[in-house]
Image (cartoon, rainbow, N blue to C red):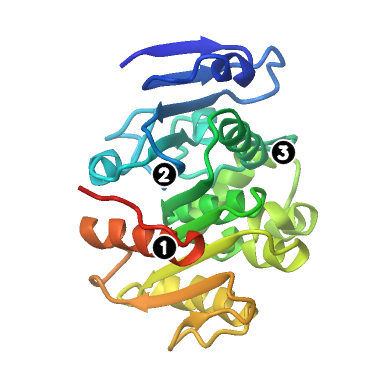
Amino acid sequence: MSIRRLQAASDFLRDSGRTERIIVTPADDSLLPLDFLYEPEESATLIVILHGALNRRRFELPRFEWRTTLERVRASKLYLCDTTVSQRSDMELGWYIGKEADNLTKRYADLVQQITVKCDYERVILVGSSGGGFGSLAMSRRIPQSCAVAFSPQTSIAAYHPNHRKVLSAVIFPQFTSFDQIEYEFAERINLRTLYRRTKELNFFRYVQNTGDRFHFEAHYAAFALSHGVDPETGGMTESGNGHFIAEKYEKGHAPPPRARFRGHIREAHRAYFGEDLKID
């Protein structure tokens, strides 16, 4: 795989017609690098893929999740590595938060919009499962007319497992003594319910929850659905039509859907929100 190391994303945009991994290391060393894999195709659709937690004993950075699953989908792909977790060797999940003064979600969203304009993409779908689903919903909110397809995501970091929350606090917000303080100061970055309540509805989303995962169903999916006026048990569309909640069972526990269903949800969201079919070989 070709790798290019740059100081600015604009350097990549001058010559972005081939598959390659790009590492953007800003001159400002207080900012985390952007690390992504771009796979262009002859398509008006760009699929942006975000990853979830990774076992640091088994996997090394960069993490470009779902490549095998999506290789049959005929669209350009942009795989984003969450460099938040590069800040500590035992950090497994960063939700694309970045640093206290480095909003990685915003910087990646800016990158996606720059690529969209430069490469003339008409449709953008952001996809992720678990922590990657959180990232896709957060990032999509910053990209007008984009669509997030999220599988069993967290919707509030405060409501997730304490061990991941404690590592995040220690690495990114060490001067705060409680997570309540962090949520008060950075609510729109760590709580999707707050983000979606406070910001304009410019994007679309398809939220798919595995009902065999009762923890995520109750602590994350139900609360987010109710905040949009949707019954979590039955699911359905939001009043505006911009969001769709789907509860379906895969298996017991925190598991993503089978590969075919994963691709199927992306295709269905593409058809529903963009009015075009997405070709899958």
Element class at badge 1:
helix
- Residue 69 position in % (x across, y down): 24, 46
Between disc 3 and disc 1, whose residue precedes? 3
In front of the other: 90 or 140: 140
Residue at image x 63%, y 46%? 169
Q: Amino acid at mark 1?
A: Arg
- Would you say the residues marked 3 and 1 are in contact, meaning their CB atoms lie under 8 Å apart? no
Distance from label 3 to label 1 (Cα)? 37 Å
Image-quadrant location for residue 270: bottom left
Decide: is 7 above or below 160. Answer: above
Judging by the rendered image, the residue that carries numbered circle 1 is 271
Q: Which mark is residue 100?
A: 3
Distance from label 2 to label 1 (Cα)? 24 Å
- Residue 67 position in % (x across, y down): 29, 39
Between disc 2 and disc 1, whose residue precedes? 2
Instruction: Tell me, yes or no, if residue 151 can be seen here.
Output: no
Q: Amino acid at mark 2?
A: His
Distance from label 3 to label 2 (Cα)? 21 Å
